Image (tube, coloured by chain):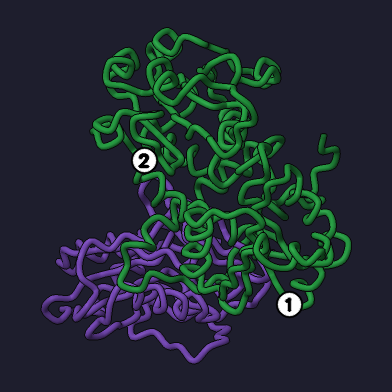
Chain colours: A green, B purple
Amino acid sequence: MLTTNPQLTADKKLRHLLTTEGLPKAIIENILDTADQFVSVGDRDVKKVPLLRGKSVFNLFFENSTRTRTTFEIAAKRLSADVINLNIGASSTNKGESLIDTIDNLAAMDADLFVVRHAQSGAAHLIAQHVNRVRPNIAVINAGDGRHAHPTQGLLDMYTIRHYKKSFHNLSVAIVGDILHSRVARSGIHALTTLGCPDVRVIGPKTLIPTECARMGVSVHHDMKRGIEGCDVVMMLRLQNERMEGPLLPSAQEFYKSYGLTAEKLARAKPDAIVMHPGPMNRGVEIESTIADGRQAVILPQVTFGIAVRMAVMSMVSGGTVDHAGGVA
Amino acid sequence: MQLDAEKLIDMLAEKIGTPVADTVIIGIHTGGAWVAARLSAKLGVAQVGTLAVTLHRDDFARRGLHPQKKATDIGFAVEGSHILLVDDVLQSGRTIRAALNELFDFGRPASVKLAVLIDRGGRELPILADYVAMTMPLEATQSLELTDENDVLRFEIREQ
């Protein structure tokens, strides 16, 4: 589908962040290590560092998402950037302007960084290729494109897993729910396999598991009780009602019965397994309320780590045109 | 060429003398943190922290981030404390500028004094140390690096 990889520079540095697919292991680890430095910024008296001072970050949301937009906005502000939020779904495209025209106009306003969310798969990729041609100083971060990718969510999930489990080498990770419509699942799977996770399982009804899963190096389970057996990490996905076309599911109640994370099903995972969810949660549809609030849930830490990971990505695509080595005393 | 840094630390401790009550020591990663740990024992100062200046460096636009696991770790209140800021080498002064900015993100200290083992000259900012163990002007082409080998600190001077 996507042939070139414009997210790396010629010398393999992060230029844009578009997808975790094909992102080198060294860069993923670099992002997670860099995020480590940013986690504690939220605890300081002054919750700000000056790395992106004087830079303009444009949040281009062609598809609504208050939560993701807010976390990018907080991340940019903690880096001292100026943030401009645009809900483009509600403005210029309705007047018939093309995507590239919109981008050119915003680039003419001296943008430094575009954070792009779009309902169409490949939109961020298209914008990145365009700015590479016309505005080589602008970086692009994909904040979710259609069913394709949501790389910062995938990376914050990796950060969360590494935080609690230290290493990926002996881990069993189960991803449960609507895999078919989930860019979060796709981004997570690519990152997990790159980081050397030996056992990734996807669990869901046949109608919600895409055929490409086998090719992605994961095992497919339709029986959740069996699929979750002995795993270290349970990543629940949101049931994406708004992306459902046609009757892929009998009902939410039916889904909960088979694939909702209940105490009974979770008991089959390891006793110290962590429970993750990208939010927003549908309690009683994907996850039992007491599990969502339980001791194994790390759903709120995911949100906190997400800001640090987005700070890391923003600063890595923004700084450093010369080299990344050496120091100055 | 090598230099015995342990001896320089003794000299520095002597110059500092008896610190005022409620002094805390903060060392700048990486070399400064090693020196700070040793100074704390010699000066009898119990509270020691470390400072990473990565997030305040002024060469970010040119060089980008330096990914590293060393982080600022200050386990006490900066607000109102007397701080002895420690680094191994003072050259351009840019690290100290960044360190002060980082420090002030945690609160407003009552005072900050700067102690370094070697002042090698080459200042680019109006910054002076309060305590210097040794002044040794070096050419910009020479590198001066503190190394920790089996828990013994040495300076390496190299022509680049």
Q: Which residue is mark 1?
A: A110
The amino acid pointed to by label 2 is Ile
In percent of width and height, residue A302 lies at 40, 44
State the residue at coordinates (71%, 35%).
A22
In depth, the one of B93 and A306 nearer the eye is A306
Image-based side of A179 in relation to B112, left or right: right
Q: Is residue A325 visible?
A: no
Eyeballing the image, is A254 above or below A75?
Answer: above
State the residue at coordinates (42%, 62%).
B29
Circle 2 crowding by C-alpha within 10 Å: few under 14, some 14–19, many from 20? many
Image-based side of A98 in relation to B88, left or right: right
Q: Quadrant of the N terminus of chain B?
A: bottom right
In percent of width and height, residue B12 lies at 31, 74
The amino acid pointed to by label 1 is Asp
Image-based side of A133 in relation to B45, left or right: right
Which mark is first along the chain, 2 or 1?
1
State the residue at coordinates (52%, 11%).
A221
Q: Name the subunit of mark 2.
A: A
Q: Which residue is mark 2?
A: A299
| Disc 2 element | helix
| Disc 1 element | loop
Q: Picture quarter containing residue A298? A: top left
In percent of width and height, residue A304 lies at 39, 52
